[in-house]
């Protein structure tokens, strides 16, 4: 075990501290550079083949004027067109393949980061917003890869080659063309900042809409029971309207930019037609040269459009990259390989809190204000106290979902901060208060933390958790799908699944947060006996409001207002601690 250094995540660093978008994009593109290079070369070949056509057309006009055979030139032009189409299709596919690979790599990176996010960072974020960054924002990298990076390079090289050939044909007409394009370029310089700002706003609006949807779908039963469908629908519609307006702003500026390049090409064509016609009439150039130059003006539009699209897509992609980088800068736990579960018969753990202080945020009151207690190996320790006293926070600190702001937590004589997170959590079994169940099969949920468990051990734990009869009733047994968040199971069944899931990990320290609160009396009594048996072999910490659960504990820790006020057995605490006596006489009495 070694002390970990969390990933740095300075939330208040200025925007200038972020790496430029192009450098980040290059990092995503680098693993796929060979495919991009191949696609770029094919695209360049397509552009080069296209540049030969005007020269062939010039020769065709000359041959026609001199009454020479033109069959050979026509065959050459036909072959160029067909080869151009085939190579262009291949190049487009290769580029799209590379772009999809870039998107996939970015999504893998983001998902890995999200799974390692520290819980306080998740608390401060909207799940729907984070989902939008994995889905919508990463999708934008596809067009940035194929259109911005490759499109800019191939467009620039094709543009340079076209300009050189135009200069060879007639420098005067080239000067006329470049004058028109320079004017269009100045207009583009004014549009690009607007495209970037609109793109950032559009992506933020998509994230907010995702957050509103997640908020509604995550609590749909509550929304329906409260008759709040219309209010929640209005909230989502407003978010969708904001996203629509932001998208329109982006589309407006992108459309203006695209049409500016198209308009520049048309004006350049008219200018060349007028100036070239005059030069042809004066004998400065022949008709074949004018035809070839006009064809190059048309060919010039394509690389110019490539460059315009590249720049506009880069602005959109830069906004997406900024949001992706924000996610990657959120505080995260160190990346570690999964740790093996404890061996059967491993020594139970012992844990101690020494003057622990804790707050969920710098602007929030302290939940723990000097909590001190110790738990020896084996046996059950129950934590009781009023709601909000800090009982569940004890478990969150042991799991290192949060870090204490003061004091020390010691597990097996070692400071908790010196444990690898993966090794620590492999030592623990945790049953949360709301006993969450994931979408998927019942087997998937049970083996979530112990995928290598054999069928015999699984059947044994199913019997211990009183789940064997449930499995027998289900139409597909363990392969039955439990629905989103376990909606096809009752609250008590979800709790038993969570208990079985924790026991399958063979924990040295078992944390039970109101683990039997939704069970009926028969199942609660049976599982209480099971937990008592488990406590003989491992260390069990539990929070409970039922007197029957608390009375069976070897020791009880009474927490009030963020401090431990008493420790003892039920009989001792009833006699010496007024708060516990009151809780036992009121809150526990109904379930005695």
Image: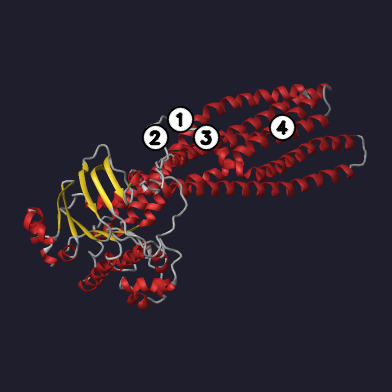
Q: What residue would you read off at disc 1?
A: 17
The image shows residue 4 at horizontal and vertical percentages of: 40, 43
Point out the frontmost of discs 4 and 3: 3
The earlier-in-sequence mark between 1 and 2 is 2
The residue lying toward the viewer, choosing from 517 and 536, is 536
Q: CA distance from mark 3 to mark 2?
A: 19 Å
Mark seen at residue 297: 4
484 and 5: which is toward the camera:
5
**Residue occupied by mark 3:** 21
Q: Which label sits in the foreground, 3 or 2?
A: 2
Q: Residue at x 51, y 35 (%)?
A: 253
Q: Is residue 463 above or below residue 547?
A: below
Residue to which mark 2 is pinned: 10
> Which element type, helix, strand or loop, lies under badge 4?
helix
Which quadrant holds residue 61?
top right
Residue neighbourhood size for the residue with mark 2, other residues' Cα within 10 Å, grouped as few (<14), some (14–19), many (≥20): few
Secondary structure category for the residue under label 3: helix
Quarter of the image where one finds residue 462: bottom left
Pointers 4 and 2 in contact (C-beta within 8 Å): no
Residue 403: x and y, percent? 31, 43
């Amino acid at each position: 075990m070694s002390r970990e250094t969390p990933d740095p995540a300075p939330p208040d660093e200025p925007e200038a501290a972020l790496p430029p978008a192009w450098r980040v994009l290059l990092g995503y593109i680098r693993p796929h550079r060979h495919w991009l290079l191949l696609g770029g070369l094919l695209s360049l070949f397509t552009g080069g083949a296209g540049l030969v056509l005007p020269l062939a057309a010039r020769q065709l006009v000359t041959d026609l004027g001199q009454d020479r055979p033109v069959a050979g030139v026509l065959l050459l032009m036909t072959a160029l067109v067909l080869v151009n189409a085939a190579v262009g299709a291949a190049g487009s596919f290769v580029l799209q393949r590379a772009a999809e690979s870039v998107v996939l790599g970015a999504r893998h990176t983001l998902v890995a980061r999200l799974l390692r996010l520290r819980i306080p960072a998740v608390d401060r974020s909207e799940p729907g917003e984070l989902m939008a960054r994995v889905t919508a924002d990463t999708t934008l990298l596809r067009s940035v890869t194929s259109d911005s990076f490759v499109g800019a390079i191939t467009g620039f090289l094709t543009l340079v080659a076209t300009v050189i050939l135009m200069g060879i044909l007639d420098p005067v007409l080239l000067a006329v063309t470049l004058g028109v394009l320079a004017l269009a370029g100045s207009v583009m310089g004014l549009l690009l900042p607007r495209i970037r700002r609109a793109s950032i706003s559009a992506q933020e609006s998509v994230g907010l809409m995702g957050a509103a949807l997640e908020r509604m779908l995550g609590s749909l039963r509550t929304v329906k029971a409260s008759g709040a469908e219309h209010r929640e629908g209005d909230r989502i519609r407003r978010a969708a309207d904001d996203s629509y307006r932001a998208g329109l702003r982006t589309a407006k500026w992108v459309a203006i930019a695209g049409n500016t390049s198209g308009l520049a090409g048309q004006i350049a064509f008219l200018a060349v037609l007028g100036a070239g016609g005059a030069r042809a009439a004066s004998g400065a150039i022949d008709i074949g040269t004018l035809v070839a130059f006009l064809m190059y003006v048309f060919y010039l539009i394509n690389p110019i459009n490539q460059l315009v699209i590249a720049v506009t897509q880069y602005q959109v992609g830069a906004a997406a990259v900024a949001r992706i980088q924000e996610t990657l800068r959120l505080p995260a736990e160190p990346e570690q390989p999964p740790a093996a579960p404890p061996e059967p018969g491993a020594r139970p753990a012992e844990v101690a809190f020494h003057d622990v202080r804790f707050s969920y945020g710098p602007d929030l009151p302290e939940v723990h204000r000097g909590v001190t207690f110790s738990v020896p190996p084996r046996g059950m320790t129950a934590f009781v106290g009023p709601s909000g006293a800090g009982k569940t926070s004890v478990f969150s600190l042991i799991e290192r979902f949060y870090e204490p702001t003061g004091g020390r937590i010691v597990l097996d004589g070692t400071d908790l901060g010196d444990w690898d997170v993966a090794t620590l959590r492999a030592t623990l079994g945790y049953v949360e208060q709301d006993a969450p169940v994931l979408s998927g099969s019942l087997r998937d949920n049970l083996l979530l933390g112990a995928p290598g468990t054999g069928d015999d051990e699984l059947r044994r734990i199913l019997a211990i958790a009183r789940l064997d009869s449930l499995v027998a009733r289900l139409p597909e047994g363990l392969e039955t799908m439990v629905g989103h968040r376990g909606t096809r199971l009752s609250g008590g069944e979800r709790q038993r699944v969570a208990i079985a899931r924790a026991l399958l990990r063979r924990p040295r320290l078992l944390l039970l947060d109101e683990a039997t609160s939704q069970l009926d009396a028969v199942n609660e009594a049976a599982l209480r006996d099971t937990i008592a048996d488990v406590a003989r072999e491992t260390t069990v910490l539990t929070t409970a409001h039922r007197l029957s659960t608390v009375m069976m504990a070897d020791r009880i820790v009474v927490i009030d207002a963020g401090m431990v006020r008493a420790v003892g057995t039920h009989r001792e605490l009833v006699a010496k601690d007024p708060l516990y006596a009151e809780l036992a006489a009121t809150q526990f009495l109904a379930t005695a």
